[in-house]
Every structure is written in C-alpha cells, then in structure tokens.
Image (spheres, grey):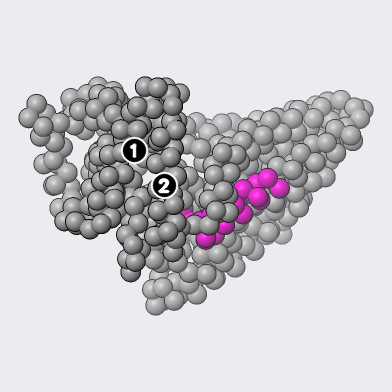
Amino acid sequence: MRKIHRKESIDGLSADQILLSMFANSRDWHNVKIIKLGNHKKILDQLRVNTNYASYRDFFGEKGIYKLQTEVRRVYDLNPKDRGVYEKELLKIDERLNILSMAFSGSLLKIIPIKNDANNTWIARHNHGNDSHESHVAINFFNAYGNALKTAIQTNDYTDANNLLNELKGYQIKNGSAILPSSTKINAEIFLNNFNVFNRLASFYFILSLTFLLFLFLSIFKPNTKLKTIYKILITLVVLGFVAHTIGLCLRWYVSGRAPWSNGYESMIYIAWTTTLAGVIFTRKSFGGLAATMVLASTILMVSMLSFLDPEITPLVPVLKSYWLTIHVSLEAGSYGFLMLGAIIGLINLILMIFITNANKERVKRIVTEMSYISELTIFGGLVMVSVGTFLGGIWANESWGRYWGWDAKETWALVTILVYAFILHMRIIPKLTGLFVYNVSTIFGLATVIMTYYGVNYYLSGLHSYATGDPAPIPKWIYIVVACIIVISVLAYLKKRKHKIIT
C-alpha cells in the first residue's frame, strides 16, 4: 500500500484487508483509484486522467493495450544517467502498476516453499514452466483459500479459511524452516509495527517541545514562578521518550539484522535519536535547551512520516554490507543531530533577543549565554563525530573502491561541513566576531552545509553517494519562506540587542 498508494489504508480498510480483498475479488478493484501518479502533466495526459490517482483499468485502452508501453520501453532503453524527472517518475508508476497486477494474480504471495531446494526457493500460485509437486500444492492451496475467503466474506465465518492458513503454516515450517525467521523475531516485528513507536514519539516530542517553550518564556516574564517540580516531571518524560526511542531502534536492528541507519527513513529516526541523546547529555538542566531538543526531534520524526520516505525494511545493497556501515554511517548521521541541535538553540536564542525589555534584559542575557554554552558543547561533539566519521569513511572507501579520497560530492561537502563548523567554534578568537549574536546566527546558517551534505548531494549532485541523475528535483517553495523568516528574525534580534546594548 505504501508502494502503490503512498498511504497505508483506503477508506478505513487496512493493508491486510485490501490485499485479501484483491486476492478474493480482484475485479472489484479494477476501477478503484489506487495507484499514486503524482502531478506530472505529461503522464496524466497519456493516461487521460485528471487526478493524482489512477485505477488499474485507466492504464489500458479498449483493446487491453497498455497505454504507457511505448514510453516505458523507450525509458528502459535509456542510459540511467540520461533519465530525467519525467522518466524516473514514469518508471515508478510502471513499477506500481506491476505490483498491483501481482497482487491481483496472487503472484506477489510467494508462500509455498520448495522441498529440499538448494536455494530455499518459495513460489506463488503461478510458477511458469514448473510442473513440480510444489506447483500443484500452490495451485490447490490458492484455489481452496480463495474459495474459502469468498465464502467467509459473505458469511463472516473465517473458520475454514483460518484452518487452511494453519495447514499452510505447518507446511512452511516442515519444508522451509531454513530461512523462516524465529517466532521471537516475527513477534518483535509485529510489535514494532503495531506499536508504531516513531510516529507516536513525533507527537509526544512535539507536545513536550510546546510545554518546554511555554515554561521557558514563563521563566523570563514571570521569574518568581516555581518551576522546579514541573521541570522534574518534564525531564522524566523526556528520558522515558528517549528510552522508548532506543527500544524502537534496537527492535528495528534486531528484526532487520543490520544497523538501522542505511536508508532515508532510518537515518531520519536515527538522527532524531542522536538529537535527543545530545539533549539529555548537554541540555538536561535548561528549559531552553530541552525545548530546542524536543522541537528538533519532533520535526525530524514528522519529516520521516512523509510519503516519500518508506519505512519498509529492505535488504542492503552490496557495498553497504560491511561493518563500516555501523561505524562510519553512525558517526556521520549521528553528528547531524548534534549540529542541528546547535542551530535550533541558536534560533531560540535569537527569538529570545527579540523579546528583550528593560525589565527582563538581565534574565534574557543569562539564559542566552547559558544556552550558547550548551550549543557550543553540542556543536563540538558534532564536529568531532563528523570529523572522525569522514576519516573512517576514507578507510571504507579504500576497501570498497581502492582509494581513500576522490573528491566525490559527498566527501567534498563533508569536508566543507568540518571546515565551516571548525570556523564557527574558533570565532571567539577573531576580533569583532566574539559576540553571542554573531555566534548564534552562524550556527543557524552553518546548518546549510549539513543539509547540503545530507540531502542536497543525494538529489542535486552526481557521485558515488548520490541518487540523482538527469533533472534535479525542484527546491520546495517553503525553503525560501523559512530562509526569509530566519533573516527577519536575525535582523529583529540584532536591532533589539543593539537598542538595549546588553548582548554583544
């Protein structure tokens, strides 16, 4: 469902219900707008649809001819580097159509193991060119289960269907136990899916971030308010959230059998974890620091929930099947959480400067100074991690590609990040650049190098670490809005601190 529809349900039906319904009554789904198209006009015109979703039948003409057949063949014949945004989107849609077709036919369900097969092969209903015993078992099972399922849908009695599934399970254990995951691992994955820990933590962290911000401003404008007990409760909730976050990552590691930071989704939830770790270590005694921690962690987890990041657990590509994945990538991705936290603290400091008055200027200066020290600690930790990670990445590159450094786009921007943050931490020894205002502004705009290293290189530049070929994806309009807002906040903070002459 994530693959073809970019959502996990339709009209309240779960993915399990939809798949079983497709298996039992596939024709009922032929006219359902289920395949996500996006908004590429050329593709919409070819299919003659005017919505972002298309049905299975929309892809075929009156004589059953696939409307995109000629274009898909042309795109597959192109060199991958010559495929632009349109071509790549066309291939994704073609893939979604094929997956839906496999769901209709039952060939998606390779659930019948071949007895004593050297390659531990499992087959589905249709196993073309094979007249083995298992092929007859598959055909008999799917026919029997399909009929039982249709009857159960009408009578709401699933006894016969469930009995067939239990027989299938026994057959799988008897003939395919060599590659079956253990019951503990199966239960762990089911628990991970049902508990949905990372999505729930996004909301939990967001509520905590608003609470911390509320009490941060309360401590500035109502300094006599007793907040000690409230602080203990909130820090306890942060620690509990961090423990749940850690358990979720460990479960994903256990289920997948590898470190959980090898793709876009996993790196996001891992960066959110390192952000929370940095907050617990460095900001646990500061309302402002913990507010920044929770704001960043919740934002990252919310981004991970977007449709373009797929949470499915997939096999690793060959180059990533190395112990260096655990070492190098954990340091590189982990450092981003520390560096991003420094930027969010800097943004909150600038916002606090905007609210300086004659009555609270001493309190604001104290809080901004304290949070700037915390920011410096987190950035120092991030700089150490990204530097060591880049050095170890060179060793991994030598093992994988036979050279330590090749000025690949990712390598170059990692070096740029190191140099920029090293400069930020050394600004204190440069005349005219020693003030808190300049430091906090630099931490915010220094984050641009992290974003370019983590995201921009993958989608806008070509190289061994990138996935971009052809036309680059357009820059979202909200990026310009965010940058404009940061500039406005910086200008207002500068004017206010200059007026009161309390923060350099």
Q: What residue type is labelled 2?
A: Glu
How busy is the neighbourhood of tag 2: few (under 14 within 10 Å), some, or many (20 plus)?
few
Can you identify the residue that label 2 sits on? 167
How busy is the neighbourhood of tag 1: few (under 14 within 10 Å), some, or many (20 plus)?
many
In the rendered image of this protein, does residue 293 appear above or below residue 246?
Answer: above
Image quarter of residue 354: top right
Depth order, front residue of 321/135: 135
Name the magenta segment's main secondary structure.
helix
Q: Residue 381: horizontal and vertical position, in percent?
A: 68, 59
Magenta stretch contains residue 256: yes
Magenta stretch contains residue 421: no
Image quarter of residue 366: top right
For mark 1, give the secondary structure: helix
| Res. 22 in view | no
Image quarter of residue 104: top left
Q: Residue 20: horizontal and vertical position, in percent?
A: 37, 34
Span highlighted in magenta in the image: 243-263
Can you identify the residue that label 1 sits on? 145
Q: At 53% from the left edge and 34% from the top edge, which residue is drawn?
A: 482
Q: At 31% from the left edge and 35% from the top edge, which residue is drawn?
A: 146
Q: In this view, does 214 lie to the left or right of 419?
A: right
The number of discs equals 2
Q: At 89% from the left edge and 34% from the top edge, which residue is drawn?
A: 229
Q: Residue 137: horizontal and vertical position, in percent?
A: 29, 50
Q: How far apart are marks 2 and 1 (CA)?
A: 11 Å
Q: Residue 426: horizontal and vertical position, in percent?
A: 68, 59
The image quadrant where one finds the C terminus is top right
In the rendered image of this protein, does residue 231 appear above or below residue 273?
Answer: above
Mark 2 in CB contact with mark 1 (< 8 angstroms)? no
Depth order, front residue of 252/443: 252
| Res. 67 in view | yes
Res 403 label: none
